[in-house]
Amino acid sequence: MTLLLAAVLSAPAVARSSAPGTGDLYVSMGSSYAAGPGVGAPIVSAGGCRRSASNFADIVARARGLKLVDVSCSGATTANILEHGQYGLPAQIEAVTPDARLVSILIGGNDVNYVTDLMGLSCRDTGGANCRVTDPAEVERRIAVLPESLDRVVTEVRRRAPAARIVLLGYLPAVPGRAAESCAALPLAPDDAVRMRARYVRLAQIIGGAARRNGVGVVPSSVIGAGHEVCAEVPYVAGYHPQKTPGWAAPVPYHPNQAGMDKVAAALNEVIGDPGAR
């Protein structure tokens, strides 16, 4: 399964523009796996979007001297990128202007209720009450429309910023490759672990497929995170009951920790390449 994901997400993409250089505009869009709730220090002005000052976009922007406009927002879907924002904010796509030279996009998990159901099943499997889990038929419907939604996002970014290098990012994995494994940080029944690993694989395949179809870069987070899932000795994703990070109102289960963000930032840097390279 890991080899399959590597093949899907590591396929070469078509370089359509030069890599950004010092002072260039970088727009980061996406959901909580981009925003970074629970990681480092929160950006107070981000409000309900729960954006971190040390998410991968911030790390990359500081290292390269880029002008960062980070509109990623916890809970975002492709509709929040294209059609309507959250918390009174405009749609994320409005941040993409003709002078953008790099646009990163990490989206799709909330379209298929990936983290929501990880939490709902963990709640149910530990005897919780009022645990929310999406009906399988609804999950299938959501999965079926996600490829077209991702294509629309890339098309609109390209229309607004023709000179921008566009990179799609996958989600770091939470459930181990041997999905039936469990631990205190991943309290899923074996069948539920297999179910959520399968959904993760499909999500990764959809993101990788969108990158190939549209000729854009891709960060293979499934490969980066292999062996660093929730139950690993060095996880890149927090478990179901993580410790609260100082400055944040509450713990954030099943989301990247700082080590995960650092690895994604390094991979994104590699995908972008040297300034002036095509």
Image (cartoon, grey):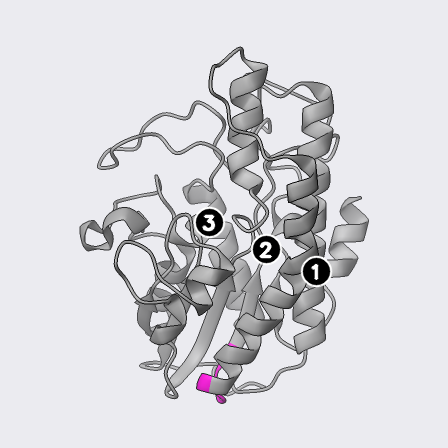
Give neighbour class at mark 3: few <14, some 14-19, many 20+ (Cα, 10 Å): many
Q: Which residues are the magenta region?
A: 160-165
- Magenta includes 20? no
- Secondary structure, mark 1, is helix
Task: Give the labeled residue for mark 3.
Answer: 33
Tell me if residue 235 can be seen. no
Task: Give the labeled residue for mark 2.
Answer: 170
The residue shown at (56%, 32%) is 118
- Secondary structure, mark 2, is loop
Task: Give the labeled residue for mark 1.
Answer: 9
The residue shown at (51%, 51%) is 263
Q: Is residue 81 above or below residue 263?
A: below
Q: Amino acid at mark 3?
A: Tyr
Q: Is residue 174 above or below residue 30?
A: above
The residue shown at (53%, 38%) is 115
Distance of mark 1 from mark 3, alpha carbons? 17 Å
Give neighbour class at mark 2: few <14, some 14-19, many 20+ (Cα, 10 Å): many
Farthest-out residue, top: 127
- Give yes or no for contact between labels 1 and 3 (Cβ–Cβ under 8 Å): no
Of 172 and 232, the residue lying toward us = 172
Using the image, tell me which numbered label, if any, was put on residue 266: none
- Secondary structure, mark 3, is helix
Circle nearer the N terminus (2, 3):
3
Q: State the image coordinates of residue 197 (x, y, percent, origin top left).
A: 69, 36
